[in-house]
Amino acid sequence: FDRIASQVFPNATILIPSADSEPFLARMPLILDACERYDLYLDVYTNATLLNTDRLEAIRTRLYKLQISFDSHKKDVYEKIRAGARFEEVLSNVEETLAYASQTNLYPVAVAVFMTLNMDHLPEYMEFIRGLGFRFAWIQRLLHIAPGTEKLDPFLACPAERVEKAVARATEAAQSCGINLTVDLGEGPPPVGTLQAVGQFFLLGRVPVMVLISIFAMSLWAISITANHFL
């Protein structure tokens, strides 16, 4: 880790400590130490199963953005999408996080993967998350990283008219209740990997760079890096 960090991090500004995994399973003290040494800030993308104010406070001075995967306000739908997660526990973590955020300059983003299971409930979802205290939301395309996901992708399983109507209704509801909504569903074939899905880099100053570090276990690191430099 130190060898790669010394080569990449001096040219980076934003660190995403996960790629299709949960950042709070990582060795966060190691990541925070690297952030301090190389003056990096964290873009944290979490499913909120391990999220609490103690963990947020530990990374607060290095936290650039907090994105929370929360795909549905309906317990049965949520637990079908996020197998193994318990709706009530995650909701409690989210509420605790939003209460903490309201006392800081942190504005968490609610992220919902656009699926056949939740596409028709998105207007009510927007109202629900606004009631929780979210001001920002992001609807993103489903990643095809496991067998059988095709039937869950509205672009493959539903008529185009139904997809367009679902997106329009979600957008209208977001505008009505005061949610700043980003709809990032892309074009072309469905994404099949992290870099295809993210498709963006962050620009601070003159150096745009995206660094994705995925921790699949405490001692196993998989690193995907793309970097672009402006002269």
Image (cartoon, rainbow, N blue to C red):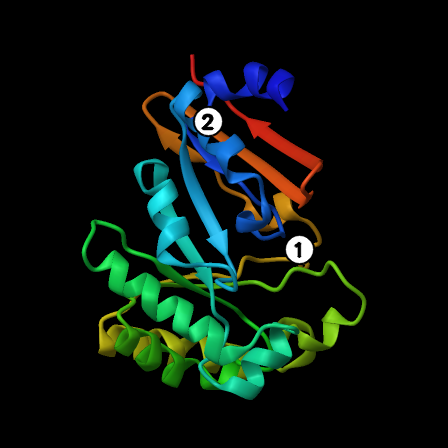
Residue at 47%, 71% in the rendered image: 90
- What residue occupies the far top of the structure in this picture? 231
Give the distance between the C-alpha atoms of the residues marked 2 and 1, in whole angstroms: 33 Å
Q: Mark on residue 33?
A: 2
Residue 53 percent coordinates (x, y) = 35, 56
The vertical placement of 123 against 182, above or below, is below
- What residue occupies the far right of the structure in this picture? 147
Disc 1 residue type (three-letter): Pro
- What residue occupies the far front of the structure in this picture? 54
The vertical placement of 107 against 169, above or below, is above
Location of residue 163 by image quarter: bottom right
Residue 189 percent coordinates (x, y) = 68, 58
Residue 184 percent coordinates (x, y) = 47, 59
Circle 2 Cα neighbour tier, 10 Å, few/some/many (<14 / 14–19 / ≥20)? few
Nearest the viewer among 11 and 186 is 11
Q: Which mark sits nearer the N-terminus, 2 or 1?
A: 2
Q: Is residue 18 left or right of residue 222?
A: left
Residue at 57%, 39% in the rendered image: 27
Q: Secondary structure at mark 2?
A: helix
Disc 2 residue type (three-letter): Asp
Residue at 62%, 52% in the rendered image: 21
Location of residue 212 by image quarter: top right
Q: Give the quadrant of the C terminus.
A: top left
Q: Give the quadrant of the N terminus.
A: top right
The vertical placement of 47 against 168, above or below, is above
Judging by the rendered image, the residue that carries numbered circle 1 is 191
